[in-house]
Image: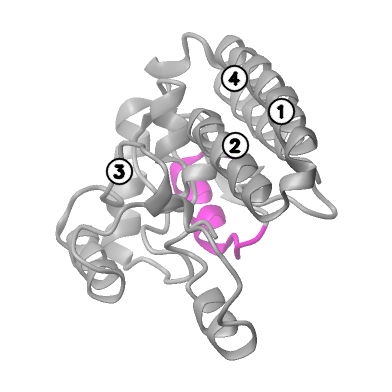
């Protein structure tokens, strides 16, 4: 389990398979958590408090898979758990883990090269899925269009976002394939900027492999911010 986003799995396991071992990655691996949403204004603080009320104090942003360095920390843990449950397959799990780590290291380097020097550009994603990715690759998140995914921001928040985009001269904002793009289109029209769609989750009709997913998003961001 990732943790933070998939608590429904707890209820499913309790009902259907209470004795099945499970690992919650956000609790099992060492990473520096990020908190906070949006502009840091009163509305964003209120949304963060709502998240904390439902997920515990100072709830960490759960989108850890968008930073491959965090995923690399999880790979040996996952291989070790599989080997513990299936000792006869330990050699296969460990070999596959080593191969995957090589792929992820190369992927991380490729994304660094793609996004190098873009930290001076304003990165305006749709919702708070991208802080770990931005931290890893030194992108500057100016604002998020919907600080709390699925909950449309107030007119005041939209107006402040448009003002921020204009003030820094941002040329593009980013929607997401899985979410309604109404807010993105409204902000883009008001600010006079383009919209580019990202995909934080993947799956048909988008990328099916993790490596392809991150590279797809990195290329989209690089292409948009280098215009």
Distance, label 4 to label 2, CA atoms, is 15 Å
- For residue 108, the mark is 4
**Residue that numbered label 2 is attached to:** 75
Visible residue check, residue 147: yes
- Residue 191 is one of the magenta-drawn residues: yes
Marks 1 and 3 sit apart, C-alpha to C-alpha, by 26 Å
Task: State whether residue 84 is above or below residue 1.
Answer: above
Kindly state the secondary structure of the residue where label 1 is placed. helix
Q: Residue furthest front?
A: 88
Q: Are marks 1 and 3 in contact (CB under 8 Å)?
A: no
Q: CA distance from mark 4 to mark 1?
A: 12 Å
Secondary structure at badge 2 equals helix
- Can residue 199 be seen here? The reply is no
Badge 1 crowding class, 10 Å Cα cut-off, few under 14, some 14 to 19, many 20 or more, is some
Q: Position of residue 59 (x, y in %)?
A: 27, 59
The furthest residue to the bottom: 15
The residue to which callout 1 is attached is 100
Q: Residue at x 73, y 39 (%)?
A: 90
Question: Which region of the structure is painted magenta?
Answer: 178-195
| Distance Cα–Cα, label 4 vs label 3 | 20 Å
The mark lying in front, picked from 4 and 2, is 2
Q: Earlier in the sequence, mark 3 or mark 2?
A: 3
Q: Which residue is at a point 62% across and 49% down the rendered structure image?
A: 84
The alpha-carbon separation of the residues under discs 3 and 2 comes to 21 Å
Residue 102 in picture, x, y percent from top left: 69, 18
**Which residue is disc 3 drawn over?**
34
């Amino acid at each position: 389990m990732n943790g933070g986003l998939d608590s429904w799995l707890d209820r499913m396991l309790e009902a259907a398979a209470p004795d099945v071992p499970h690992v919650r990655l956000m609790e099992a691996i060492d990473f520096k958590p990020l908190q906070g949403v949006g502009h840091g204004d009163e509305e964003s603080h209120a949304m963060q408090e709502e998240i904390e009320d439902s997920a515990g104090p100072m709830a960490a942003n759960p989108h850890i898979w968008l930073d491959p360095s965090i995923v690399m920390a999880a790979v040996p843990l996952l291989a070790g758990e599989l080997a513990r449950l299936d000792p006869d397959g330990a050699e296969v799990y460990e070999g596959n883990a080593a191969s995957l780590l090589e792929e992820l290291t190369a992927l991380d380097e490729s994304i660094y090269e793609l996004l190098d020097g873009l930290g001076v550009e304003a990165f305006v994603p749709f919702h708070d899925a991208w802080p770990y990715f931005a931290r890893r690759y030194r992108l500057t998140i100016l604002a998020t269009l919907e600080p709390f995914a699925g909950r449309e921001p107030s007119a005041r928040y939209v107006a402040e976002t448009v003002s921020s985009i204009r003030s820094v001269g941002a040329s593009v904002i980013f929607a997401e394939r899985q979410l309604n793009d109404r807010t993105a289109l409204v902000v883009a029209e008001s600010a006079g900027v383009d919209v580019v769609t990202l995909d934080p989750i993947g799956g048909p009709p988008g990328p099916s492999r993790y490596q392809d997913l991150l590279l797809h998003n990195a290329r989209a961001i690089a292409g948009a911010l280098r215009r």
